[in-house]
Amino acid sequence: MTAADTGRPDVAQTRIHNIGYRSYDGPRLGRAYARRSLYSQSLRGAYGLGRSAKSKVLPMILFAVMCVPAAIIVAVAVQTKMSELPLDYTRYAITTQAIIGLYIASQAPQSVSRDLRFRTVPLYFSRPIERGDYVTAKYAAMASALFVLTAAPLVVLYLGSLLAKMDFADQTAGFGQGLVSVALLSLLFAGLGLVMAALTPRRGFGVAAVIAVLTISYGAVSTVQAIADVQGSTDAVPWLGLFSPITLIDGVQTAFLGAESAFPGGQGPGTGTGAIYLLVVLALIVGSYAALMRRYRKVGL
Amino acid sequence: MIATESLSKRFPRVTALDRLSVDVGPGVTGLVGANGAGKSTLIKILLGLSPATEGTAQVLGLDVATRGAEIRERVGYMPEHDCLPPDVSATEFVVHMARMSGLPPTAARERTADTLRHVGLYEERYRPIGGYSTGMKQRVKLAQALVHDPQLVLLDEPTNGLDPVGRDEMLGLIRRVHTDFGISVLVTSHLLGELERTCDHVVVIDGGTLLRSSSTSDFTQTMATLAVEVTDSDEHPDGTLALRQELQERGVTLHARVEDGLPGAGHVLLVEAAGEETYDVVRDTVADLGLGLVRMEQRRHHIAEVFRTDQQADQQADQQDGQHAHEQAALQAAQRGGGRDGS
């Protein structure tokens, strides 16, 4: 008896304890960590990761649609042994601008309007982060998500071009120019999209507003440019390009990144006008940030 | 825990806080005031999110004007309004909020599981919040305020929108936050009654000024109150009135105010119980009048009585008279209907 008892002492001692409340003595990583956490959560959220299956559908489809043409181009180029890609790196984003527009229109409201609508923003501000941290994290996350969307097909093109044994230096330079161009585009579109979306807690309005600003401005600018080109006032064409986001990017990359302009008649801006394009783009990016800061001053707690 | 010194907050049109000086120690403290009394403004200032117009405030010994971020790292906040996204689960949401408070990923997950269990959310914590009841949502809101193990939590109207059972559970939980978790609590409410059971200390503000600050036991006297309800008879068409007069003749003290908030409240007499004999007097009086005794029960004093001004009492009495008349009309209509059925 005693032998059995002493032989299995752990049986008698094994009990389920209600350990009650445990306090936390571990590290608290503070503001910078919280900002990074918000950034990664927002970036993942922009592709539906960590959210419901339904919210993964649209961003993933758009991502695929964005990459498929690049894959086809590469396949054709490899098969037919082209010496150069049929589409410039810098031209890709201009050609697929509708998809980019759709992506920012669907994801910018989900990034900021949700927090406004469900009034989660005050919870963020009751944590160590401040207004600037919130805006920076959201802006950076949206711009990164757009960069992933626009840079991925360029990577496909670049890898394809290497596979087809095209001129390495030439392709690398083009790829680099393309990346700079889409980085600028991501910052500009993310800023405009977030400002639009942050104005309304209603997601539907946000989506409509972003699409309207991107497509209407592009439609108007390209129509007026076409008319100006036909009527012979070709000098006006580059200046008109200042009034829509995508033509701004087109102008900047024509002037500085060796791209061919998609403007009617190929009338891209020269270096002088190009500097103004670049200034306007930077002003819009800074302006978007300032507008967001202003917006969140009101919706604090 | 919290100390404010002639704290004022003025907006262009209104003065939300007017030279408020309070000192809140550890434990559960109730902050009571009508809507617009300045409760939420005070919380905003205490979290360092809104600068005070004048005066100073310290939370956990840190100045709110200069060390807001440090305060917010050690303080939890549960807002009054809905603040939960419906399409994520409670676990995901609370983990995210824990990380926003600076907890490393692993610790955030562990603390989330612990905290959700402590507030009483089990299997449902993996489902999207959109499908939760109000009571469960309030628990998630409380959990996100506790998840980073703060030294102090600020709870803004945590019982808002809950049914009586949910209210009691929430109040019990708030009590446990202090007794079991060792976290001090500042809880706001516009209902004094529900705070007397939960709080050690009650601070009452009105119009941005301090009305009273003292421990809960000071508020409620030990004297008991009897609630008596009687039926009417043919001899005494208004049994309550007859009893009231008869009791007064026999020297029993009646409260001027009437019971509020419950159906048939106008019929309830509140009698001050001087001792055992009061019960007998009431029983005898009712028997002598030939009325039926519906109930006679002991009531506790509520803190509300302490603050009720005569004017407020009058207003409520007026309202109840109105209700009473309405109810009687309905009753008579029902009786007439019943009479026809019988004949």
Image: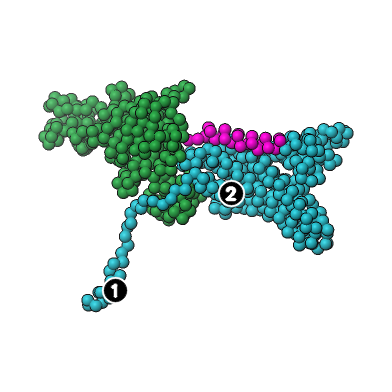
Chain colours: A cyan, B green
Residue, disc 1:
A8
- Where does residue A5 sit, x and y in percent of width and height? 25, 74
Looking at this view, name the residue that lies furthest to the front. A169
Q: Quadrant of the N terminus of chain B?
A: top left
Which residue is drawn at the image coordinates 12% and 27% (left, top)? B250
Magenta-span inclusion, residue A293? yes
Label 2 neighbour load within 10 Å: few <14, some 14-19, many 20+: many
Chain name for mark 1 = A
Of labels 1 and 2, earlier in sequence is 1
Q: Is residue B163 visible to the viewer in this orientation of the structure?
A: no
Name the mark on residue A43: 2
- Where does residue B287 sit, x and y in percent of width and height? 14, 34
Q: Is residue B307 above or below residue B157?
A: above
Which quadrant of the figure has residue A266?
A: top right
Inspect the image, locate mark 2, and give the three-letter code of the amino acid beneath it.
Answer: Leu
The residue range painted magenta reads A279-301
Depth check: give the residue in front, B15 or B296. Answer: B15
